[in-house]
Amino acid sequence: MDRVRLIPSGLPYHATLLVLVAASLLPFLWFVSLALRPLSETYVIPMPLVPRSLTLQHFKDVFRYVPLMVLYYRNSFLITGGAVAGVVAISCLAGYFFARLRAPGRDAIFWAVVLSMFIPPLTAVPALYELLDRLHLLNTRTGLILVYIGWHLGMSTFIMRGVFAQVPREMEEAARMDGATDFRIFWQVMLPLVTGGLVVVAIFSFVPIWGEYIFAFTFTQTKEIMPMSVAIRFFEPSPASGQYTLNVASAAALFMFMPAIAIYVVLQKWFTKGLMEGALKF
Amino acid sequence: MSRALTEVQRGGLGSPTRAAVHGIVRKWGGYLFILPLLLVYLPFVVYPVLRSVQLVFYRYEYITTDPPRFIGLGNLIHWIQDARVPETFWITMKFFLLYVPASTLVALLAALLLDRVASRHVSGLYRSVLYFPVVLPASIVFHMWKWMYDPTLGLFNQVFQHLRIPWPWTGWLVDPVVALPAIALMSIWRLMGTTMMLFLVGLAAIPNDLLEAARIDGAGEWTVFTRIQLPLLVPMFFIILVLRLQVLGLAIEPLVMTEGGPIRATMTYGLQAYYISLRDGNWDMGYGSTWFVLLGVLATGLAVLAWRLMRNRLEVA
Amino acid sequence: MEDDRRRTEPRKITRRRFLTAAGTGAVLATGGQLGSHVMGRRVARAAPAKTLRIGIYGYMPQGIPFDQVVKNYQQKRTDVALTVEPLPGAVVADWPATVRKFTLEARQRQASVDLLIGPTPWIEPAPLAQAQAIEPLDPLLPKQITNDLYRSVLREATFSGDGRMYVLPWWTDVTGLIYRRSYLQEGAGTDRPPETWDQVLAYAEKIRAKYGTRVYGYGADWWASHRLFLPILVTLTRELYDKDGVWKMDSDAFLEALGVIQKLHAFMPAASQQDLGSSRVFQAGGLAMQSYWQTQMLRAIQAGQPSSDIFMAPNPRGRHSGTIFWTAGAIIPKHSANKDEAVRFMVEGMLDPFTVQKTFDNYKIVPYHSIIAKMGDKVPAWAPPLLGTLSSAQPIPMNPYWLSVEQPIFKEEIEKMLLQGQPLQATRTNIANRIREKLREAGKR
């Protein structure tokens, strides 16, 4: 159901939006044009803004350079999917706790969890390596998933707590008067109201985990476990591989980008639903 | 109060044991909500961080075979006297001031505009496009922008030449004055989408009736925005500000784009700490941890402050 | 009462059900993963006794068909099972991550690969050797291989801390002067490349007069000490390093080399400040001469510049001739499961004729005397002059301090010199003082 509006959405809005869209798209389009243009139209001064000819060679080269792309992809999906599911579920429960339930030490625990947002994960790498080794979780997807969940709980819990805190207390009080337990209130009353927040948390944790490098590189050893975020580094232009691979790197990045955008488009529906249910609280 | 009533209402819980169990569940049951959190958080976050904090008091040179050596407050004293601390912190603050207000305003503008678009499909389309840059793999984006900023082959200088705009700062990343703003611009482009999403959630939480009522009363768009939406978005501003405090630890962007140069113009606090731990000399992890831990303490302090301020406003509202 | 009971039952079931479901799910997921992991280990132990896990830097197979190399080797040796694990490495931000990863493994008495191919001795292997995370190769390698290496390359692979060899070189890059003959012809009036640094300056002057900013005269990565500074310095003095492998910063030659860079900088494009920036301009046809290693010739050809117009001359002379080179090779982690096989692969796989030919095709030099002799006339035309200079070249010392102390300080100071006008003497003094102080700190343990 579309939101009913009494004012027509006017030209100035669309015009400004189009400017923003152009600003967002221009670098991205240049990026796409790099992936599609032949080298002869890349290394020229001045470099043409719009290439006169297109080529798909770079996309083919992506698989020539890294034949195992599909394997790395699959790993990314498994790892990121597992981690995001974990983050959403755990931070949802925890967010409700921190926002609404009264318990001793609640605030202290909350800030202890949020603190992790400001600690660079880099500092934890040696200790984590040792821990994962002892738990026999090195070079396993489970190990990496658990690490990712842990390090994204700070931000997600913070967001969920904020979202839960915004739900009017009346709904909750009414349910409590009816004798519902915390869990029932959570499951039947609060949860439907925060789906927008859940989707935001999902998207916010999906993107960094999908592209995370340091943990993935250090804790994975074989190609069966290594995700795309490490493999994409093979395409990074470097003194060793030569500058010309930026065209191929753009093509590879587009490959890596496509499932992310597909998932995002699918989530769009949830997101819109969540936003609207939030708006229809009354 | 209401809990006692419900128990009476339920009328008899059976044996005292059941009552006791119920009592325990009632008192401690809430903690079940954070049990999964603690199960993951404690071993995988708290433990390594504590080890990191422990390192603050040790001299631990990573690429040597020496074991860590306890030196008490040595690292802290070094940090207090280190001239690079205020220097790099100031650069980080400059970045923060360049990046945070600009990206927040652009995101707010985008969210407001999207909110006012009538068709759900069209707004969804706009939203997808504006969010695009966020999902691109970061490392490739950095290289792409590095190339876009190339003084000879880069997009920006080409466009300016094409349009005959006499742009004076064609050095971009190689110009000590422009390097930091250039990185800020890239970050705004890349991450604006996330802030926009948060604003959209915030805007959606504002009841429609409120807005319609105001409009029916004849309020113009500007009034609707400033009198109704903006105040109700304040909690979201605080959330965003706290999330943006992460920028204080900025290291990856300057690492990839400029390696802290030119002439240390982009040597942020986080990057300097990274170099101390992982490049300079014998890789002094103890001292590097000191930098990171102190930053974490500062950032959390600021976050708590911001949250307290916001909570007061929320309770009132 | 009825209502209340109905409300009581679902409540209990819901919570219990949730917890049970969540618990079961978690147990199943973890159990499944751990189970398959344990099973996998058991399966692995049943596999052929000899396996060799080869780690290779991901960019290498881009130029050289490494899977073919492995296949060839596998055919020769059927008693070993080879697996190849590509690793990203040697990219600006990544070498510390690689060093840390392998140091962590060594500390835990583990190794994720039995052999790692790709590192350059004074980048990752130097700190790895210092942390004792890799294995010295002298006792493992056959004498005929180490004797066959160019002396300078052998010295490059020797760690200054204990004098032992830690890297077996695969290929070498040599720095020289790459130029576009047509630009020299039209701009400087001759197609003979400059032979001294003064001549380079003279040519650049003429080219600038002719082309303005359409074609720059000269370019190089002036901020990277191994790409311009050391190639100049090595032609002004024969004593670049002290006994610990640290730069001799008080020599007149040191100051003189800085001066040459200052003069050359006037002719360089702005992009020269970036990693391979000048090469990019050369690849776009906007640069006449550049100081780089030979592979950048290939890059220009691949970017579309006419191969008949691109040539490489030896590094220009100062008081004498000389050049800088570096190597990529193979290292063995300390707890490699199969060191003997690793060595065998290095010698018989990495250095076999097929691999060597492909390496040269990729514009890389394989620095072994008899291997090159065996190639006969298959050695490409650009190689012999560079091989000549390689004989007299000085290696960059394999100690961790170039990357961790000397280069970062050099970069900051030379940026101040060229971008802010810091005088030569002050630049040299700063470099010397700061490096000495950092080394003192590092020495204090």
Image (cartoon, coloured by chain):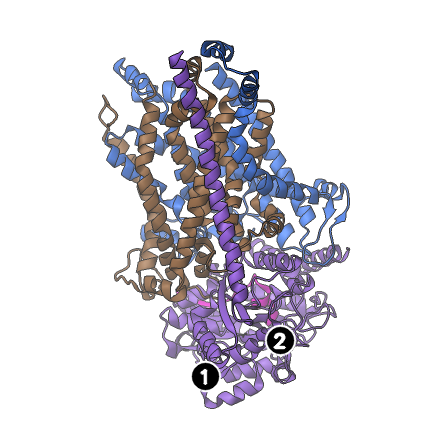
Chain colours: A brown, B blue, C purple
* Dot 1 amino acid type: Pro
Name the mark nearer the viewer: 2 or 1: 1
- Residue range in magenta is C214-231
Q: Would you say A17 lies left or right of B28 here?
A: left
Q: Report which residue position mark 1 lands on.
A: C380
**Spatial separation of the CA atoms under disc 2 and disc 1:** 26 Å
Q: Is residue A63 above or below residue B264?
A: below
Rendered image quadrant of residue A14: top left
Q: Which chain is indicated by disc 2?
A: C
Of all chains, the one bearing label 1 is C
Mark 1: which secondary structure?
Answer: loop
User: Residue C171's spot in the image, x, y percent?
Assistant: 53, 75
Q: Is residue C264 above or below residue B314?
A: below
Q: How many marks?
A: 2
Whether residue C228 is in magenta: the answer is yes
For the point 52% across and 74% down, the residue is: C80
Q: Is residue B129 visible?
A: no
- Whether residue C123 can be seen here: yes
Q: Is residue C319 above or below residue A158?
A: below
Label 2: state its secondary structure. Answer: loop
Category of crowding for the residue at label 1, using alpha-carbon neighbours closer than 10 angstroms: few (below 14), some (14–19), many (at least 20)? some
> Which residue type carries mark 2?
Thr
The residue that mark 2 highlights is: C235
